[in-house]
Amino acid sequence: MKERSYNNLEFDPYDYYKVYLKPKVNEEAKTFFDNLIKKSNTNIDLNNNLTKQVRALSEEINDKTSKLSLFKGLKTFLIILCIVGVVLAAIGIFNIIKGYELVYLLLIIIGVLVFIASLLIVTLVLNKKIKEITGENNKLKDKYNKAYKECYNTLNDFKATLNFKQYVNFVNNLDTVITLDEEVDRKKIKLFQNEFNCNFDFGENQTIVDVYSGTIANNPFIRVLLTDEQLLDHTYSGSRVVSWTETYRDSKGRMCTRTRTETLVAHYTAKAPNYYTNSMVIYGNGAAPNLTFTRYPSGLKLNHDEKDIKEIVKDRSKKLEEITEKAIKEGKTFTKLANEEFDSLFYAIDRDNEVEYRLLFTPLAQQNLVELITATDTYGDDFSFYKDKKINYVSSYHGSLGITFNYSHFYSYAFYDLLEQDYIKMLTDSFYSLYFELAPILAIPLYQMNEAPLIEDGGLKEEITLTEAEAFVNHMDKTLFRHPKTNTKQILKLKRIENFKNADLFDVTSYSYQTINRIAVVPVAAMNGRVYNVDVPWIEYIPVRMNNKVAITKIKEENVSNMESEGNNIYRYHNFLATFVGDNEYSESDDDIFAKAIKSRYNIYK
């Protein structure tokens, strides 16, 4: 367990954030970034000087481009005037030939003068000016491209050091009880399976797009970002205009006819896939091992006030009293807590063990969670919390936004000042997102006091877990796995085929849908009493699946250069590399070829 100096706030995550983390983390991120820059021997002064040149050239180019647009616009206007002059002269000539007044002679003269003047300005002035500015602009662009490339290259040494381990080290060096692993820990997976009865089977409608593991004190967690596909009802609409003739008597009693029209609207409902991104922290802890409950966000907005809180507490307190009275009549154990604010805001009304619920949610835990739920300077109450015996699931809205440390984002950077600003921001944003995903767990002191059993590493041969392999393939080129007839997103699921000397081979199944345009004929009654058929276009989604294979191996991230230089069908995710095998066979000789392709650049673990 890491040494901590919480200043008596070790069991109060929100106050610790306000007192310590908020002012400290940005400072730590700046120091962390500066150290990385120094180790990479990046010439900051050279980059800053080149950045000034590039930006100055960019301003000049923009200035020249604006002038060029102005002159080109003026040229277009004068060409139009030339045409107008020709038209005026032609009208004048036409009318004089027909014998009309001599006033048309003036029209001819004006037309000719406009034509000649416009033509002379275009040919003698504007064309020359446009050519001159275009030439200057092209020279400036050449200078810009050369300076930009040089500026970009000054950061290559730093880009070559970029890896996920940097984020892991940053988090682990902070003064918190949170520790991250460089890769998903196989021992933690085994611990979840053996001790907490959790096998991470998310089903065919969910795929892992990002994952990492860690510990809170001495208890494990896995954080996953999932793409979730659900078949939901989708309603389509169609319309048809109908008309008919009807007879009626007017105010004088005469029989008349008139035509009536009506737009008939029909609806047709069919299943359609919907895709969502969901985050989930899966946390194992043996405290309160028989307790199950669910809580959802209370509905408090981030800009709420005390009145909003009181309304929720007042409304839910009455419901809690009703639930308590009903439980007494039915011989159940549900009892409303003395702390109405917590009980109403946390609102875990399906809890099934009152003794363990109170053991877990001590007065301090209740206070901590109320602080998190009612906070207006963090993410607020955007989390769900589901406890199933020894397993805890926490999902949050901000976590589903995918705020994570994506080091490959910086491969395209050329300017040091932007790199520094955005790297520090990504580092701190990623940490805060994780911290407040874990905060509902950190708020419960008993969880930190309880310690998970140790798991031996014996018999664990896999070099990459299925969870991390699934996240990997979701970072590869998605078209590799796409069924030729699919028109939708795809859900990728993996199975391990074999462990080779250098790489692990996986089967990748892509689940998606082929779409077919259909017409549903829906009968609709009109105001005239007749029933008409209305066509409703709709889309039928037919499930399709496709299987391919990938081989994945581990590398030492310290020696990784940027993703853009991989090529040769080699992909990178954290400290792993993969090659797409498709529906081909993968043998020991293929495994050796794959290893040789990357050994010249990287060290391989296996």
Image (cartoon, helix red, strand yellow):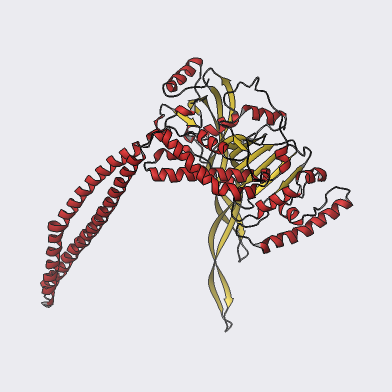
Q: Is residue 518 visible?
A: no
Quadrant location of residue 36?
Answer: top left
- What is the number of callouts on the image? 0
Residue 282 relative to residue 35: left or right: right
Front-most of residues 105 and 100: 105
Q: Residue furthest bottom?
A: 252
Q: Position of residue 341 (x, y in %)?
A: 74, 56
Q: Residue furthest top?
A: 589
Residue 520 relative to residue 73: left or right: right
Rendered position, 104 above or below 395: below
Q: Which residue is at a point 41% across and 45% down the rendered structure image? A: 418
Q: Which residue is at a point 29% across and 41% down the rendered structure image? A: 147
Q: Position of residue 595 (x, y in %)?
A: 46, 20
Quadrant location of residue 257?
Answer: bottom right
Q: Position of residue 376 (x, y in %)?
A: 61, 56
Q: Is residue 75 visible?
A: yes
Residue 448 relative to residue 572: left or right: right
Front-most of residues 482 and 190: 190
Residue 332 relative to residue 26: left or right: right
Q: Which residue is at a point 66% across and 46% down the rendered structure image? A: 9
Q: Position of residue 11 (x, y in %)?
A: 68, 44
